[in-house]
């Protein structure tokens, strides 16, 4: 069987996914929207080998715990079922950003694994089918398959729940600043666990889910009109919607650190000077700032003065997950 290698970009959600209507199939409670991150990449090589009696999974420069290895194996089982094989696989993966610290490595990780495993088994899946498959490994991975700016539909069946590109103003030249907070290891409450707790124990959960639907409509309207301020207002509302749900979950889930809030305040100050850059935060302390090209220098400068900021990675919008020729082994 062939060896195949794929790369996929991580993504940052503008409209957030936080909860499943179907745990097994990973059908989300609400539709979500994300931007692919050009500089945040996972590369994964998969080779099915008759000589193996179990899957061999490793990550260069990092470690997979038992649960993560099991999730990769389970995902390979989905691919094996589609391909009608039982052969075990060797999987080597590499991220160019920290795993499990809120930078959504599971999104690029499961997208790259899906595309590489489908390539190695010569399944010939189209982008929609790859997105459906990636979603079952990790929900946000569905959006890393098309990349770009994409919407992931809720769906009532597995076949209806996939991501595809969403119309985005072609004249918006923007960057995303990945503002990494100092001193963070693996996040304490992972997304899968956190969203299950919120669905069960947050008293505002159902209101928050319907608000996500309203915010998606507002986002589409702002993008349709090319309304940058309106776009920014929605993504910041969405950031607070997610974190309000997390904070009011039992037990309380607090992903923000002091510096997370300091970044917000710095952006508010810049806004008084007419510089409109917007923040959003996933399940960790790091902030993603969406900024027009012409303001990158000034925003980066202001944020780098905060002592709790470790690094700022400037990135463009990442493309679709794809096969490449350079294998990791
Ligand atoms: C806060 O996709 O990691 O980043 O489907 O359980 O693997 P699972 O969850 P995951 O959750 C991502 C949550 C989020 C918001 C988002 O990306 O929409």
Image (spheres, helix red, strand yellow):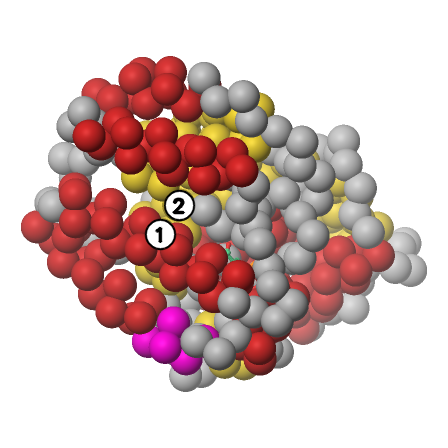
The extreme left residue here reads: 225
Answer yes or no: disc 1 within 8 Å of ligand 1. Answer: no
Question: Given this view, does label 1 or label 2 mark the residue nearer the observer?
Answer: 2
Is residue 207 highlighted in magenta?
A: yes
Which residue bears the numbered disc 2? Answer: 280
Q: Are marks 1 and 2 in contact (CB under 8 Å)?
A: yes
Q: Which stretch did the figure color magenta?
A: 205-210
Give the class, few, some or many, for how many residues have Cα within 10 Å of label 2's Cα (few <14, many ≥20): many
Tell me how many marks there are.
2
Placement of 277 over or under 139, stated as above or below: above
The kind of secondary structure element at disc 1 is: strand
**In the image shown, does 322 or 149 lie closer to the viewer?**
149
Q: Is residue 262 left or right of residue 116?
A: left
Placement of 19 over or under 285, stated as above or below: below
Spot occupied by residue 50 in the image (x, y as percentages of width and height): 85, 57
Q: Is residue 164 left or right of residue 99?
A: left
Residue that appears at 54% across and 21% down: 307
**In the image shown, does 205 or 151 lie closer to the viewer?**
205
Quadrant of the drawing holding the C terminus: top right
Which quadrant holds residue 79?
bottom right
Residue that appears at 73% across and 66% down: 74
Which residue bears the numbered disc 1? Answer: 14
Residue that appears at 36% across and 41% down: 279
Q: Is residue 125 left or right of residue 272?
A: right
Q: CA distance from mark 1 to mark 2?
A: 7 Å
């Amino acid at each position: 069987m062939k060896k195949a290698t794929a790369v996929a970009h991580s993504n940052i959600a503008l409209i957030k996914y936080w909860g499943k209507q179907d745990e097994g199939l990973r059908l989300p409670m609400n539709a979500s929207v994300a931007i692919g991150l050009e500089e945040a990449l996972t590369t994964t090589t998969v080779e099915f080998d008759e000589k193996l009696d179990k899957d061999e999974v490793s990550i260069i420069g990092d470690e997979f715990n038992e649960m993560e290895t099991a999730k990769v194996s389970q995902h390979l089982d989905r691919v094996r079922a589609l391909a009608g094989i039982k052969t075990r696989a060797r999987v080597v993966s590499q991220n160019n950003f920290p795993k499990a610290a809120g930078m959504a490595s599971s999104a690029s990780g499961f997208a790259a694994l899906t595309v590489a495993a489908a390539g190695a088994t010569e399944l010939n899946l189209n982008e929609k089918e790859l997105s459906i498959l990636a979603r079952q490994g990790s929900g946000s991975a569905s959006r890393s398959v098309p990349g770009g700016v994409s919407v992931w539909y809720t769906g009532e069946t597995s076949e209806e729940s996939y991501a595809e590109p969403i119309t985005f103003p072609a004249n918006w030249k923007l960057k995303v600043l990945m503002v990494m907070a100092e001193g963070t290891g693996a996040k304490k409450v992972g997304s899968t666990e956190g969203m299950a707790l919120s669905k069960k124990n947050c008293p505002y959960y159902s209101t928050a889910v319907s608000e996500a639907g309203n915010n998606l409509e507002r986002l589409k309207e702002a993008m349709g009109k090319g309304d940058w301020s309106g776009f920014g207002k929605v993504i910041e509302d969405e950031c607070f919607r997610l974190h309000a749900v997390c904070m009011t979950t039992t037990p309380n889930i607090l992903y923000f650190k002091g510096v997370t809030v300091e970044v917000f305040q710095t952006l508010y100050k810049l806004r008084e000077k007419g510089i409109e850059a917007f923040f959003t935060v996933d399940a960790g302390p790091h902030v993603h700032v969406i900024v027009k090209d012409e303001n990158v220098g000034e925003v980066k400068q202001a944020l780098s003065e905060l002592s709790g900021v470790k690094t700022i990675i400037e990135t463009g919008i990442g493309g679709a997950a794809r096969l490449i020729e350079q294998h990791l082994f």
